[in-house]
Amino acid sequence: MLTRHADVDVARVHQALDAVRDPELGRPLCELGMLGDVRVRRGRVRVEVRLTTASCPHTDELRSAVTTAVSGLDGVRGVEVSFAAMPARERAELGERLRADTPSLGGGGLGGGPAIYAVASGKGGVGKSTVTANLAAALAASGQRVGVLDADVWGYSIPRLFGVRRGPVVLGQRMLPVPAHGVALMSVGFFVSEDDPVVWRGPMLHKALSQFVTDTHWGTLDALFVDLPPGTGDATLSLLELLPDAALLVVTTPQLAARAVASRVVRMVSGQVAGVVENMSAAVCGCCGEANAVFGSGGGALLAEEAGVPLLGQVPLDVELREAGDRGRPVVLGSPAAASARELSRIATGLPAPRRKLAGRPLPLSVVGR
């Protein structure tokens, strides 16, 4: 309902509100049906924002964005923002609209779609999730739209590495990724208590991973990182079937024993490996800066040579990297000058573009006239 006042142009109020976007969906509030009543009385503007969930953590951000957009207009003497939750029916309808106008991550033709990187390792404890989180955060900081799918269902750590523990918003049959540090996240860790074990077997595991891919509103991404569980089990095979265009980034330590285990992953997915990242290449002393190769040397280079792919980088282990994981803020954001952060940022900017497969895809045809 609109009430006109001589010193405020209501049409301009609506025009200003057109620029306000939902932090999670990245679309204008009016387009999403999230803009409620706008009332003007004696220069004071009241705007109702309809939230996708009553427990929305972005109310302060939305209040600030609406106030900023409107307060600079001629004649506006004050702005009041109120909030109300959408009813379940409208949330479900919004979810269906999002499903209809967003391409699937796993399907499509030759063009478009994000670059998908599946980060793998032969064994646990080599820092695969840390590498995933920092590569994603570095690309997001450069202005790209980035997502992380945490497929390490038994040893998930992405929520902790990004410092978030809340559940995703559900719109009917559609889930919204949880945003953190500019990255869209989805993890089984958002659905269970941090201390509870996840006891999933074959069919249940495959169904959950499929929902993370197809029932999550990832929006339009430039890059998606998939944090795979270590080894060559069901979860890895399921994800590579769901995301056939994924290129593997294999993480290993310099230790030759770790390289030997990681080589099994390389052999399992021959032809899909884009490169090798050697983590914990050396321990950097926080006092003198001296680097010590406590895990040996040469493992990453040897694995890359065996696979016929580039060694993308060698990430040192320093105090800043460890502290960043404990704080829930990737080191490339929290301590960008650290040796580990500089190398991770360099790797992110030089990631090779995944090669898209042609098998099973519709090819564009054109008819040439005589």
Image (cartoon, grey):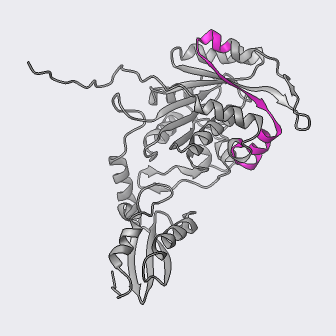
Q: Is residue 94 left or right of residue 279?
A: left
Q: Residue at x 55, y 35 (%)?
A: 225
Which residue ends up furthest to the bottom in the rendered image? 42
Q: Residue at x 45, y 22 (%)?
A: 355
Which residue ends up furthest to the left in the rendered image? 370
Which residue ends up furthest to the top in the rendered image? 306
**69 or 297, nearer to the observer:** 69
Where residue 180 appears, x then y in whole percent? Answer: 60, 51
Quadrant of the image occupied by residue 229: top right
**190 or 207, nearer to the observer:** 190
Q: Residue at x 50, y 80 (%)?
A: 80
Q: Quadrant of the C terminus?
A: top left
Where residue 106 appears, x then y in whole percent? Answer: 41, 33
Where residue 257 appears, x then y in whole percent? Answer: 76, 15
> Which residues fall within the magenta stretch?
303-331
Residue 40 sits above or below residue 177 on the image: below
Q: Is residue 300 visible?
A: yes
Quadrant of the image occupied by residue 104: top left
Whether the magenta-drawn stretch holds residue 308 is answered as yes
Residue 247 sits above or below residue 264 on the image: below
Q: Quadrant of the N terminus?
A: bottom left
Q: Residue at x 28, y 25 (%)?
A: 362
Whether the magenta-drawn stretch holds residue 210 is answered as no
Where residue 76 appears, x then y in whole percent? Answer: 45, 82
Q: Is residue 55 visible?
A: no
Which residue ends up furthest to the front in the rendered image? 74
**Tally of marks:** 0
